[in-house]
Image (tube, grey):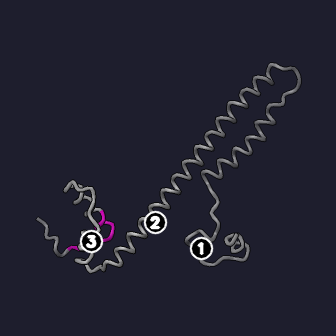
Amino acid sequence: MQDHSLQQYDDDEVGRIIQRALKLKRAHGISFEDLVDIAQEIGIDSQTVKTAIEQEQREFKNKRIRETRLKRRKAGFYSHLWSYLIINAALLIINNFTPGPWWFQWSVLGWGIGLAFHFKAVYFPYTPPCKKKNKIKLNRTDFMMCIR
């Protein structure tokens, strides 16, 4: 058996160990009082625990909002893509059976450009420099975009 009393654990390991212990205990969670007691045993006061809980709940809520927004954007893009394919296939058939020059390629091209911009907006959204975490200094034009 290994002597665990001298071993140090980082934050990620602590989180995983506690989660695994709760699973082994078949507990669905712990109460606020138990959480405060555990934190006090390792030298963390209850106010810090409360602040951490509020921050975690806020971050979790924001993450769910971002995920929901991304799902809606993807669904909108796929709806746009199917409309593009079906309508342009119909236009190709119509153009094939009517006399005169080919014209359906112009709708494919024009609508395709719009579809490409929609794809870019969904899968590669623009993040203003003020929202990039590694950006420290902003030039004047970047600053003006951030305050709009």
What residue range appears in magenta? 7-15
Q: Residue at position x 23%, y 56% from top?
A: 27
Query: The C terminus is located in which quarter?
Result: bottom right
Q: Going by the picture, which residue comes out furthest to the left?
A: 1
Q: Is residue 42 above or below residue 125?
A: below
* Quadrant of the snapshot with the N terminus: bottom left
Question: Dot 2: few (<14), some (14–19), or many (≥20) neighbours within 10 Å?
Answer: few
Residue 136 in percent (x, y) is at: 59, 77
Q: Residue at x 36, y 73 (%)?
A: 50
Secondary structure found at label 2: helix
In the rendered image, the vertical position of residue 73 relative to residue 30, given as above or below: above
- Residue in the foreground of this view, choosing between 71 and 127: 71
Which quarter of the picture shows residue 84?
top right
Q: Which residue is mark 1?
A: 135
Q: Which residue is mark 3?
A: 9
Q: Residue at x 48, y 59 (%)?
A: 63
Distance from the alpha carbon under mark 3 to that under mark 2:
26 Å
Tell me if mark 3 has few (under 14), some (14-19) or many (20+) residues whose alpha carbon lies within 10 angstroms of its own.
few
The residues tagged by marks 1 and 3 sit, at their Cα atoms, a distance apart of 32 Å
User: Do the numbered discs 1 and 3 sit on residues whose CB atoms are within 8 Å?
Assistant: no
Query: Residue flagged by tag 3: what amino acid is it?
Result: Tyr
Numbered badge on residue 58: 2
Q: Nearer the viewer, mark 1 or mark 2?
A: 2
Residue under the image location 64 percent in, 35 percent down:
82
Name the element at disc 1.
loop
The amino acid marked with disc number 1 is Lys
| Left or right: 94 as drawn, with respect to 2 | right
SS of the residue under disc 3 = loop
Magenta stretch containing residue 88, yes or no?
A: no
